[in-house]
Image (tube, grey):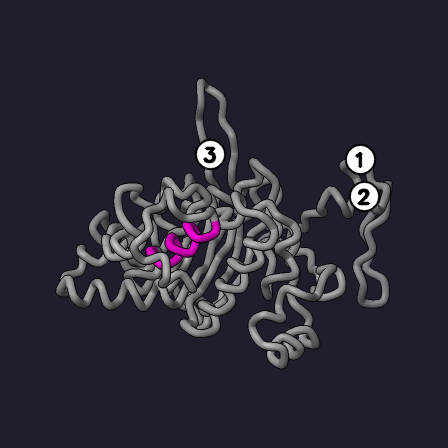
């Protein structure tokens, strides 16, 4: 298995990821040379419109899809140089999944506790150990009182909490969440986001949330914007707000309002030093053609209309 030299605090490194789908003789590029690094223990979001490539990226991080070109390293190891057996172990032990639709997360004929216990049977241990761990996880996600309820007896938010407990059943290093709040109301969404923060802080787990919800930007420390299969911009929480969060505790993270105030936005250069301008930025600058003038003035790069 190929390995990459990486720092201990980098858990995921994407290099030039390309994904081409073919359908009825038509080729569609979902990813176009995407580069991305994710630090160990990050709580971050990948945001983009439908068709931007964000779900394709999530599937690759989970080992569910292979790129047409490029490399993806997890813990310094090339994910797609793994044997099939190693890939199965990766999916079982390194990553946990939370899907938007509860049908992908829960068995309808099992109680909440039984659903959480199910993944544990692949790793041995006694039924008593499985039960005790399932109850601990349900308590951690704040739904222990629903341990004997079936999915149909749970609200959408309660189902997602059970799904998160299931995803944590085998102690993964990375939690991958695909639109985890897409089917719930705003109040429930805020509660689930608070839960992600709690898990991130208490367990140190890396959490990657893929969504189209731009309002999520002020609820995580880092937001990666993906457009046309490449990273266009990033939003990083300002240190002054990080300090306020530490003072206020976990529940204070969602109360800062406009992300333009709490986050610093950066454009991202790829490995070939190319820059992608967002549609919003193009519109603000009044750029309506594919040609611009670029100048370096006093240590600044200035882009103007043709």
- Label 3 belongs to which residue? 20
**Residue drawn at the location 74% of the way across and 59% of the way down:** 258
Judge left or right: residue 291 versus residue 225: right
Q: Nearer the viewer, mark 2 or mark 3?
A: 3
Among the 4 quarters of the image, the one containing residue 267: bottom right
**Residue drawn at the location 44% of the way across and 74% of the way down:** 202
Q: SS at mark 2?
A: strand
**Residue drawn at the location 48% of the way across and 51% of the way down:** 157
Q: SS at mark 3?
A: strand
In the image, residue 144 lies at what x, y percent? 36, 63
Q: Are marks 1 and 2 in contact (CB under 8 Å)?
A: yes
Give the CA separation, mark 3 to mark 1.
27 Å
Q: Main secondary structure of the magenta part?
A: helix
Which quadrant holds the C terminus?
Answer: top right
Q: Earlier in the sequence, mark 2 or mark 3?
A: 3
- Label 1 belongs to which residue? 289
Q: Report the disc number at residue 292.
A: 2
């Amino acid at each position: 298995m190929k390995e990459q030299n990486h720092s201990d605090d980098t858990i995921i490194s994407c290099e030039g990821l390309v994904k081409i789908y073919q359908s009825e003789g038509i080729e569609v590029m979902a990813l176009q040379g995407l580069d991305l690094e994710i630090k160990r223990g990050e709580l971050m979001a990948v945001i983009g419109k439908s068709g931007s490539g964000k779900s394709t990226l999530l599937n690759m991080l989970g080992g569910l899809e292979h790129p047409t070109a490029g490399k993806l390293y997890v813990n310094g190891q090339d994910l797609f140089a793994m044997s099939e057996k190693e890939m199965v172990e990766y999916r079982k032990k390194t990553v946990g999944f939370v899907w938007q639709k509860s049908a992908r997360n829960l068995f309808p004929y099992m109680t909440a506790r039984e659903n959480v216990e199910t993944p544990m049977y692949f790793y041995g241990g006694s039924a008593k150990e499985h039960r005790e761990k399932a109850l601990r996880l349900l308590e951690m996600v704040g739904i222990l009182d629903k341990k004997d309820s079936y999915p149909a007896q749970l609200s959408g938010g309660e189902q997602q909490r059970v799904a998160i407990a299931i995803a944590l059943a085998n102690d993964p290093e990375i939690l991958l969440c695909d639109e985890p709040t897409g089917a719930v109301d705003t109040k429930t969404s805020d509660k689930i986001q608070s839960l992600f923060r709690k898990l991130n802080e208490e367990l140190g787990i890396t959490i990657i949330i893929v969504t189209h919800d731009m309002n999520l930007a002020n609820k995580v420390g880092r937001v990666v914007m993906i457009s046309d299969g490449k990273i266009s911009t990033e939003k990083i929480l300002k240190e002054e707000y990080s300090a306020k969060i530490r003072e206020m505790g976990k529940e204070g993270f969602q109360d800062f309002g406009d992300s333009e105030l709490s986050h610093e936005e950066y454009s991202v250069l790829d490995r070939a030093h190319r820059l992608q301008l967002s549609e919003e930025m193009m519109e603000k600058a009044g750029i309506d053609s594919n040609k611009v003038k670029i100048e370096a003035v006093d240590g600044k790069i200035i882009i103007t209309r043709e």
